[in-house]
Image: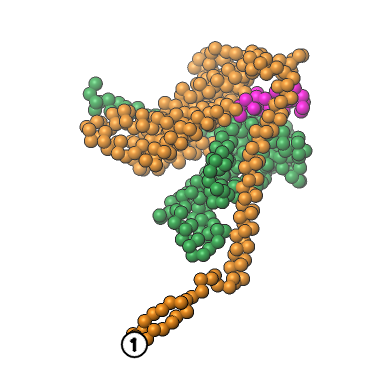
Chain colours: A green, B orange
Amino acid sequence: MNSRVQEKIAFTLLSLAAFVVALPVALVPAYILFRGHEALTWEFFTKPPVNGMMEGGIMPAIVGTLYLVAGVVLISVPLGVIAAVYLTEYAKQGAWTRIVRLAIINLAGVPSVVYGLFGLGLFVLFLKFQTSLLSGVLTLSVLVLPIVISSTEEALRVVPSSYREASLALGATRWQTLSNVVIPQAMGGILTGTVLAVGRAAGETAPILFTCAAFYLPSLPHSLKDPIMALPYHLYVVATQLPDAPPRIQWGTALVLLIIVFLFNALAAIFRARLRKQYRW
Amino acid sequence: MEVAVSRTGEEKVFPRPKLQPPAPSTSRRSARIADTIAGMVIRVGGSLGLVLLLLIFLFLVKEAIPFLSEYSPAKFVSGTQWYPTSEPAIFGLVPLFVGSLWVTVISVVIAVPLGVAGATFLSELASPAVRNWLKPAVELLAGIPSVVFGFVGMLVVAPYIKKAFNLPTGLSALTGGVILAFMALPTIVTVAEDALNAVPRSFREASLAMGATRWQTLSRVLLPAASSGLIAAIMLGVGRAIGETMTVLMVTGNASMITGSPLDPVRTMTATIAAEMGETVQGGAHYHALFTIGFVLFVISFLINLVSDAALSRVRSQRAR
C-alpha cells in the first residue's frame, strides 16, 4: 500500500477514536439532563423525601454533601498544602522525601473503597466516632489528601527558583519568602488542584458507605456525631434499593449530583485560565 | 583601615564600615520569630499529614491479621467459593478475583487502544481549537462520579447489552467492563499524551527530514520512543479499573461465581466489600475477611503504581534530555 494512503487511513482511525473518547462526555450529561430536568423544582431542592422516598425532594442529601465538602475543605486543604510546602521547601531532598513521595503517589491510586475500610477501622470503631458526619469528613479528607499534596507540590515546583533566590538575597526570611513570593505565585495552581480534589470528594460513594451515610433521616444533622444523608449515596439508594422509585426522582438526583460536581470543575477551569494569564516567566 | 589618596596628594584615612548586621529592629526580630514558628508548624504539620497516610496501611494489616491467623491464608487465596454467611462460612478469594479480572481485562482491551489513539490524535493531529475543546472534555469525563456512571450503566447500557446478546439479564462482566473503559479513558489519554509530548523534537524532525510521512514518523519513531509513558498510562488505567467500586457494584450483577464467559454476572473484590460490609458483625470473621480483601486490593494497587512510577521516571529523564 502506498504510504500516503496508509497515512490517510491511520489518521482517519485516530480521529474516529478521539471522537469515541469524547462522545460520552457529551452524551452522559445530556441524557441525564434530558431525563432529570423536570424534577428540578423548588420543592425538589427544599423538601425532604416523603412517603418512603417515593415523593418529595432531596434537600437533606444536598445539605449533607455540602457539609461533607465544607469539612473536607477545612481539613485536607490546610493539611495538604502544609505537607506539600514541607516537602518542597523545607525537607532536605533525599531518600526520605523520595520514599514519602512514592507513598503519596501510591496512596492516590488506592481504591476508594479501601479508604472506606480505613475510615471504618480507624474513625468509626477505633476512635469511636460512630457512623457520623465527623467520620465521613475525616475519611474523605484522607482520600483527597494525596491529591491535594501532589497538585500543590506541582504548583510550588513551577515557581522559578530565581524568585526565591532574589527574595532571600534581599534579606527576607524563609517564611517571608514563602508567604510573600512563592505561595502567591503558586496560588492559581494550588487552587485548581484543591478544587478538583474537593469536587472528587463530593462525588465519592464508597468511602462514605460505612462511615457516615444514612439511608433516610427525618431531620438534618445537629452535630458532628450525627449520621447524614449524602447525594451520591442517595442516588445509589434510589437506584438500587428502591426499584419502584419514580424515574423522575432517580434522574433528578443524578442531575443534581452532576451539577454540583461540574460546578467544581468549572471553578477549577476558571482558576486555571487565570493561572495561564498570570504565568509569564 | 583603608587608605585613599585625595586629589591634592594628601593621604586620608577612612574608617572601614563595620561588617555587622544593623541593630535588629523590632520588625526584623519579629520576622525571624515568625520564620521559626512557621518552619516548626510546617515541619510538624507536614509530617502529620504523611504519618496519617502511612496509617492506612497499618490499619488494613491490623484488621486483616485476625482473619489470616484463624482462617488459613492458603485456603483464602485458593478457595473457589465465597459463602460468607453459610455455616461454616467459606471465604475463597478466587471467584472475586476472577470477577475483578474479567471486568478489568474487558475495560483494558477497550480503553487502551482507544485511549492511546485519542492521545495520539490530541498530541499530533488536533488543531489547537479542537485540542482546547477535547482536553477539558476528557478531564470532565474523569470528574463524573462513579455512582452516576453506575446509574446510567444500569438503566441505559445494561438493557442494550441484554437485547444485543439475548441474555436473561444485562448486568454482566461485559457491561461493567464497557463502562469502566470509559472511566479509565481520561487517565490513559492524559498520561499517554504527556508521554508523546515528552519525546524530543529532534526525533520527529530527523524522521521527517529522512522523507518519512507523518504516519511513519508517528508509528515507527514517536510511539516506540514514548513506550515507557504508554506503559505507565496502561498501568494507571488498569489500577483505575480494578479499584472502581460503585459502578461495578451496580452493573455487574454481583454473582460470586467463577465464569468463563464475559456475558455472565460477576462479583468483584471491591463490590464485595461495599455490598457486604454493611451487614457484617463488626469484629467477626466476615468483617476481618473483608479487610483482608481490602489489603489484597491495597497490595495490587501498590504494585501497579510502582511499575507505572518506574516507567514515568524514565519519561521524566527523557524530557530532561
| B283 drawn magenta | yes
Query: For residue B152, which quarter of the picture?
Result: top right
Q: Residue A156: where, in percent of width, then height?
A: 50, 50
Label 1 SS: loop
Left or right position of A267 against A233? left
Give A101 or A121, whichever is nearer the viewer: A101
* Viewer can see residue B19: yes
| B112 drawn magenta | no
Q: Residue A267: where, in percent of width, then height?
A: 52, 48
Left or right position of B277 against A27? right
Q: Residue B5: where, in percent of width, then height?
A: 36, 81
**Residue at position x 74%, y 25% from top?**
B66
What segment is highlighted magenta in the picture?
B272-298
> Which quarter of the rendered picture does the C terminus of chain B lie within?
top left
Query: Most prominent secondary structure in the magenta stretch?
Result: helix
The residue to which callout 1 is attached is B8
